[in-house]
């Protein structure tokens, strides 16, 4: 999806704007040779030859200095930005577009300014900075309000793409339909076909209405066939192939992607062939034709290497690795995955880095190479933190822009009011001079005018005061957002602290046990004892990690549940069995009694977590040779899960803290077991998500009884995600 969206943005912008660029300024003789090099770079880029395009730009750069005209500078930076954008070097593209804007402003050419603004906006969209992108598009649109030509509606089409990525799909569709009506009225079939294609993409990817998408693709195909526009027709066939792939009609998907490739061969769209071969490989993978898919991915790889298409190198190597992995050739697959990892370092995409790190994590985990798996697990965490930090920065940047925009508008309003007041004062002075030569009646009129002016000043003062209060309100909102960001950072630090502290000891114990087992010859009884302890330590680590992850998701407002029919016996018995090493070590008897005949409906993962944490706590705080009773029963309106133990009892401060959620609290078990303090917090939150309740009571003569009530009508009362 990333590749398609990236190409679609570039495609939309250059189709509408390129033919009109620089139409208002004629270059001098000295500039023509430089501009010819820049134009050659643009033609090479259109053909998908990035290396050739870069070579022409480098030659043009040698002719550019501080004395170069705004026209040359604008054309150079505009094409440099387009090349960087095509290679997905977003930071370079944005920097170049800003320089292009500066040159265009000096050039005082409206079309050039609009083109630079629009190009910068497209790069910001791919960089997920949608609010900032929309701001530049709106600035460009203001310049064209009195000139609603093809460029104006092309810009609206780009804004529709921004709305689409902001998930405002209805607004995006409305804008596309407005643009489509304009091109229909003007019989601009080429532009109309582009809009039909984009509407089809909106219905396919976002609305998931494949029938509607198919209809728009067909209209685009008809229009492009009518005007013999093969480049756009190949894109239509490509998108139609993706549609049939979504509908699991793989034969049709292959048919249309091959038609797209045939057209791209005819028109020499080599860069496009890299994408088409990659798409064909994905379809063949879905059909189980792994050998054929490897051939397709290698063709994509060859083209990407030849023309320096870095994203193409990433996806082609990834496809080959996945196909080899599906064939069971793990060692060969690893070679390509390692190549992908190296390539991802040159790409400004956290999602790509995360994707390959996750694949390598799963690979080493399946191979039981836990050291390398842990390395990539840590890497995934760092990437997730980077994504979160990046998003926070983007949010703060957007808030800052909104604040500055409001401030600027308010300042402009104040200046206009001051200008109005000054004009009124001049008018009054003129009237006063006239009164010196006119009769008493004119003087009375002057008094009336002065009175009205005073009233207007009072109104203006009130408006200024109102605007000041609004600014203070916006500032307070910004401060509140900043506080939320600090809380998010504190949450991340707490998660790292818990992970570092509470996973270190059990993992060290596991390592020690493994070393002992490998260095000493053990009897079967000793081996069984060691394995049981190893299993216990592993289960403890997994439970701690699972609790931390679940707690973190809850803190990040992940409140979704997935209700299904559950086998409570199977779940509870499995949990009790998983704790056998712990109960055997403390000689604890665990009894399970099910008195319910009704069907339990609940979220399986959350119910499993509730039972797992409560049973684990009961074992943790039970004395040696204690007894734990797990009971599952039902009342008229509720299912009742009860766990009683003979342990040391739960402290009132723990229950109080559980309600206030001020901090994570935990105490040592009867044998020195240490917890994270997250378990009970998770239990409470999951019970509340099911609209249930949890009660703690004393178990006479000693111990605790924890009772969880889950409503029987949970299936109909909870909004199931």
Image (cartoon, rainbow, N blue to C red):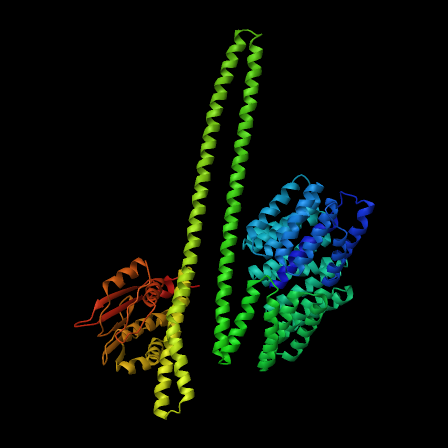
User: Which residue occupies the extreme left position in the image?
Assistant: 701
List x then y, in percent, for residue 178.
63, 48
Whether residue 694 is visible, yes or no, is yes
Residue at x-position 56% and y-position 16%: 429
**Compared with residue 83, is residue 360 higher up or lower down, i.e. above or below?**
below
Q: Is residue 563 left or right of residue 353?
A: left
Q: Is residue 352 left or right of residue 218?
A: left
List x then y, in percent, for residue 689.
36, 62
**Closer to the camera, 177 or 142?**
142
Whether residue 192 is visible, yes or no, is no
**Compared with residue 343, is residue 131 higher up or lower down, i.e. above or below?**
above
Quarter of the picture containing the N terminus is bottom right
Q: Is residue 219 left or right of residue 711?
A: right
Residue at x-position 77% and y-position 59%: 228
Residue at x-position 23% and y-position 63%: 652
**Compared with residue 465, is residue 161 higher up or lower down, i.e. above or below?**
below
Quarter of the picture containing the C terminus is bottom left
User: Which residue occupies the extreme bottom position in the image?
Assistant: 523
Looking at the rendering, which quadrant does residue 44 occupy? bottom right
**Closer to the camera, 519 or 339?**
519
**Closer to the camera, 717 or 679?**
679
List x then y, in percent, for residue 436.
56, 8
**Compared with residue 316, is residue 456 higher up or lower down, i.e. above or below?**
above
Q: Is residue 105 left or right of residue 451?
A: right
Residue at x-position 30% and y-position 57%: 660
Looking at the rendering, which quadrant does residue 92 occupy? bottom right
List x then y, in percent, for residue 525.
34, 91
């Amino acid at each position: 999806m990333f590749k398609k969206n990236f190409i679609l943005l570039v495609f939309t912008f250059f189709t509408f704007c390129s033919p009109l660029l620089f139409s208002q300024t004629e270059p001098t003789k000295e500039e023509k040779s430089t501009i010819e090099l820049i134009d050659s770079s643009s033609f090479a880029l259109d053909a998908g030859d990035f290396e050739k395009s870069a070579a022409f730009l480098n030659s043009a750069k040698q002719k550019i200095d501080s004395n170069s005209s705004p026209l040359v500078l604008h054309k150079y930076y505009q094409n440099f930005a387009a090349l960087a954008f095509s290679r997905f070097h977003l930071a370079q593209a944005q920097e170049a577009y800003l320089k292009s804007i500066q040159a265009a402003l000096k050039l005082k050419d409206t079309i050039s300014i609009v083109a630079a603004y629009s190009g910068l906006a497209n790069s910001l969209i791919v960089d997920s900075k949608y609010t900032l992108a929309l701001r530049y598009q709106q600035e460009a649109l203001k310049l064209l309000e009195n000139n609603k030509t093809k460029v104006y509606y092309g810009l609206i089409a780009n804004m529709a793409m921004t709305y689409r990525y902001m998930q405002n799909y209805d607004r995006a569709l409305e804008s596309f339909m407005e643009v489509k009506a304009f091109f229909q009225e003007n019989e601009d079939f080429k532009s109309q076909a582009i809009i039909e294609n984009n509407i089809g993409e909106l219905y396919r990817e976002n609305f998931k209405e494949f029938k509607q998408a198919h209809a728009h693709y067909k209209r685009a195909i008809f229009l492009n066939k009518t005007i013999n526009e093969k480049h756009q027709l190949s894109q239509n066939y490509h998108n139609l192939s993706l549609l049939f792939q979504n509908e699991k009609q793989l034969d049709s998907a292959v048919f249309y992607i091959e038609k797209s490739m045939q057209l791209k061969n005819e028109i020499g769209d080599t860069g496009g062939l890299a994408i088409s071969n990659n798409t064909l490989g994905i379809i063949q993978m879905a059909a189980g034709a792994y050998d054929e898919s490897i051939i397709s991915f290698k063709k994509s790889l060859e083209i990407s290497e030849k023309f320096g298409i870095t994203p193409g190198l990433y996806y082609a190597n990834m496809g080959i690795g996945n196909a080899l992995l599906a064939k069971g050739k793990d060692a060969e697959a690893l070679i390509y995955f390692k190549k992908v990892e190296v390539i991802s370092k040159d790409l400004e995409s956290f999602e790509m880095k995360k994707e390959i790190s996750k694949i390598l994590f799963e690979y080493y985990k399946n191979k039981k190479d836990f050291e390398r798996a842990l390395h990539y697990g840590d890497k995934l965490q760092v990437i997730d933190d980077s994504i979160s930090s990046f998003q926070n920065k983007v949010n703060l940047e957007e808030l800052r822009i909104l604040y500055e925009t409001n401030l600027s508008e308010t300042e402009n309003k104040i200046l206009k009011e001051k200008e109005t007041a000054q004009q009124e004062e001049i008018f009054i002075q003129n009237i006063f001079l006239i009164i010196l030569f006119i009769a008493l009646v004119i003087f009375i009129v002057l008094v009336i005018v002065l009175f009205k002016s005073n009233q207007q000043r009072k109104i203006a003062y009130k408006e200024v005061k109102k605007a000041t209060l609004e600014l203070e309100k916006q500032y307070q909102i910004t401060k509140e957002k900043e506080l939320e960001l600090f809380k998010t950072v504190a949450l991340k630090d707490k998660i790292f602290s818990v992970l570092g502290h509470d996973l270190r000891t059990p993992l060290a114990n596991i390592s020690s046990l493994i070393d002992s087992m490998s260095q000493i010859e053990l009897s079967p009884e000793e081996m069984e004892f060691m394995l049981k302890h190893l299993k216990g330590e592993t289960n403890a680590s997994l439970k701690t990690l699972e609790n931390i992850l679940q707690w973190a998701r809850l803190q990040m407002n992940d409140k979704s549940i997935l209700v299904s029919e559950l086998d409570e016996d199977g779940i509870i018995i499995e949990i009790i069995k998983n704790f056998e090493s712990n109960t055997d070590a403390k000689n604890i008897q665990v009894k399970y009694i099910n008195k319910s005949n009704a069907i339990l409906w609940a979220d399986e993962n959350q119910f499993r977590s509730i039972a797992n944490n409560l049973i684990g706590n009961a074992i943790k705080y039970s004395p040696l040779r204690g007894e734990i009773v797990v009971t599952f029963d039902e009342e008229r309106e509720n299912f009742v899960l009860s766990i009683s133990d003979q342990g040391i009892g739960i402290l009132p401060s723990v229950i109080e803290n559980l309600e206030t959620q001020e901090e994570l609290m935990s105490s040592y078990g009867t044998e020195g077991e240490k917890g994270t303090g997250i378990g009970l917090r998770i239990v409470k939150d999951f019970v509340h998500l099911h609209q249930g309740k949890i009660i703690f009571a004393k178990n006479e003569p000693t111990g605790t009884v924890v009772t969880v009530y889950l409503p029987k009508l949970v299936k109909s009362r909870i909004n199931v995600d």
